[in-house]
Structure formats: C-alpha cells, structure tokens
Amino acid sequence: MGKIAIVGVMAGMACAAMSFATSSARAAAVEIQTEDVARFYKLYETTGGRPTVEQIQHDYLDQATAGLRHLTQVRNVNAENIARATATTPELYTNARSCMAALPRVRERLNRSFDKLLALYPEAKRPPVTILVSRGKPVAIGGPGDGVQISLEAACSTNAARFLGADMDDRFVRLIAHEYIHVQQSPVLAATEKLTVVERSLIEGVAEFMAEVIAGGPSNVGVFASVAGREREIETNFVPDVDKTDLSAWFDNTTAENVGQLGYWVGYRIAKSYYQHAPNKRAAIREMIQMTDAKAFLAASGWRPGIKLN
C-alpha cells in the first residue's frame, strides 16, 4: 500500500482542535479533548497510513490523555490491535477524516445540550469528553468516575451510521449525550456484577430518554426504528424477563439481519412513562438519574406493555 494522501488533514484537525479549545467559558461548558486524534493522524500521515506497533505505542499510546489511557485499561485496545485494524480495515481511518469537519458544529450543539442538562440537573458532574482513535470499537464508553470516550473511527463507520443514524452531527451529539448521562448515574448499579434485564434496560433507557431531552433524540435510532409494528409484542415479552441475568435476548445481540438491542427501547419507554406520570418533572429527572432500585422504579413508572406516551 502506497503513501496515502491526506491533504489538509492536519490543518483541519488543528482548526477543529482550536475550535474545541476555545469553547465558551461559561460555567456549563464541558471540556472536549481531541489531542489524541491530532496525534494519531500526525503519525498516520507520516507513515502512509501503516504505522507499526512500535510507532503506535511510542508516538500515540505512550502520550495518551487520561481518557485514552482509561480506554486501554478497560477494553482490549492496544498498539497491536490498532496496527492490525489500520492494515485490515484502512477505510475506517480514511473515512474518519470526514467527521473532523463536523466537530466544531458538534461542539456548539453539545454546549447547548450540556446547558440543558445543568439547568435540569445542576449537580451534574462535568468530566471531559475524550475523542480518540481506537481499533474500530468500542464506539463509545462512559460511566461514573470515568468520563466519556468516543472512538472517532468507529463513530464514523458505516455500521455506526446504520445503528446510530445517518446524520453525522446528530449521531455524535446524541451519542455523547447518552454516554454523558452514564457518567451521572449511580455507581451502585454500574458496579453490579450481574445486572438483571430491567437494571440494564433502565441504565440504558434513562440515558436514551435524557439524550432525547437534552440533545433532541435518542442515540440508538436503528433500534427505535426496528420496533415499528411490534411495540406491544416486544413489551409483553419483556415482562417475564425483568429479573433474568441472561441479557442475550435484549442486549449485545446485533446481527447482520437484526439490529437487536431492544432493551434500550423498552428501558426508554419505562423512563419516559415515569417522567410523564411525575407531577414534579425536575424531581423526576433527578430520581431517574440517581436510581439504584430498578424494580421500584419500574413499579412507580406507570409503564405497562403498549402504554400510549406523548
């Protein structure tokens, strides 16, 4: 493979990074870090798109931000599999350049989303969002005490467009909003070794509902589109599974033919029902974000299979 021409990439990245760095100084602004992306693509350009394991380790991972270091510690991300991914799926890394141009627009919309979150939930934690380059997955992670990490090449992929929406700006804003809610949620559930179906559904469903509230829509639009015409059947099937610790019918079950992940949608519906039945909406948001007892939340939500919600 010859040297890949990456015309204007570094200039574009510098502009994007500067735009992020000069984010509004108002109290609601959340830091969005892009240093890892700029450093990776500097290496990518100088190596013609084929950096070695040693180069990735020395020039990229050894200088990682705290967010990138966290990703390498909790997921199978290292120099070897990044090098393998650049060699076997180079389109992930060349296509990711198109997302760089969207980042300044994403930053502006995210600031508005974070403003909304803080207006509704003033005690929200504000760790940075780190945009980085990985091995094609995970797309994003976030959790209490860990901040949010977004893999640029994965979030820009054709699979991400299928599952998270074709509009690049919407995809990034809603994905980051979803993960940022995970940062706010109770560490009690996050630390649970064996989540039940209803616990995992509400962790994800609350994040989807709040992404809709602060960012204009849920992140997993492919899942939401897939339920059309099957809503009552899906929710009826959910009821006997709520206490199961085998999550495979509801999560992490995407195939080429089926989006799966229906727990996201049912959890969103339960969260939305809780909110719509609550007399005090601000208190309802606090209660759903701080939820530790999923079964009690379900019982208080007023949700039932096929319920009509606004």
Image (cartoon, rainbow, N blue to C red):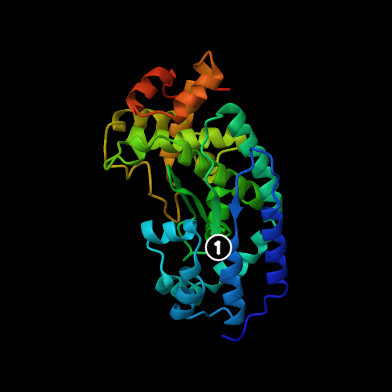
* Quadrant assignment, res 70: bottom left
| Quarter of the picture holding the C terminus | top right
210, above or below 258, in the image = above
Label 1 crowd bin: few (<14), some (14–19), many (20+), radius 10 Å: many
Q: Nearer the viewer, residue 309 or 76?
A: 76
Callout 1: SS: helix
Q: Tell me what residue is drawn at x 72 percent, y 69 percent.
A: 11
Question: Can residue 216 be seen?
Answer: no
Residue that label 1 marks: 153
Q: Nearer the viewer, residue 193 or 162?
A: 193
59, above or below 303, in the image = below
Query: Residue 153: where, in percent of width, then height?
Result: 55, 63
Q: Nearer the viewer, residue 51 or 168?
A: 51
55, above or below 159, in the image = below
Horizontally, residue 33 falls left or right of residue 14, namely: left
| Quarter of the picture holding the N terminus | bottom right
Q: Tell me what residue is drawn at x 61 percent, y 34 percent.
A: 214
Q: Amino acid under label 1?
A: Glu
